[in-house]
Image (cartoon, grey):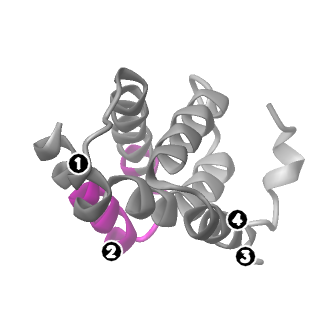
Amino acid sequence: RLAEEAFEGAEQQGMPAQVGGLIALAASPAAARTALRLANAWLGEAPSGAALACFLGAVLPVVNAGFCGEALEGGGITRGCLVGLLQTVRSVGLCTRKGVGSEPALAEVRHLLRVALEHC
């Protein structure tokens, strides 16, 4: 886990969204789903608001790449993918509870997760 100081200012500079965008561009859908599972495990049990803000900024493009309808049509959903999906649902719930992130961004992630759950 990173020190809390690592999160200070990162969200304002757009770094999490840039990292998420790079993962979404470079990774296959299966690799994006694995990245989500690993990132959620890294987030820990009780993340701070700053950590959640960074996570949310990075997770939106990765969720889109890994769980959009086209990515799921070829099958290949594993137990690990489902774990990553459920962990992301938990993280979005934490963001909502702590008031982290904009409502449109949270709504978009919720919609993508709903689509993914319908395909599983």
Point out the stretch of residues depicted in magenta: 96-112
Disc 1 designates what residue? 116
Which numbered disc, 3 or 4, marks the residue that appears first in the sequence? 3
Q: Which residue is mark 2?
A: 104
- Dot placed on the residue nearer the N-terminal end, 4 or 1: 4
Q: Position of residue 45 (x, y in %)?
A: 57, 22
x then y, percent, for residue 62? 50, 58
SS class of the residue under badge 2?
Answer: helix
Q: Which mark is residue 12?
A: 3
- Choose between 111 and 30: the one closer to the eye: 30
Q: Quadrant of residue 39?
A: top right
How far apart, in angstroms, are the residues tagged by discs 4 and 1? 22 Å
Distance Cα–Cα, label 3 vs label 2: 18 Å
Is label 3 in contact with label 2 (beta carbons under 8 Å)? no
The amino acid sitting under disc 4 is Val
Quickly name the residue at label 4.
19
First in sequence: mark 1 or mark 3?
Answer: 3
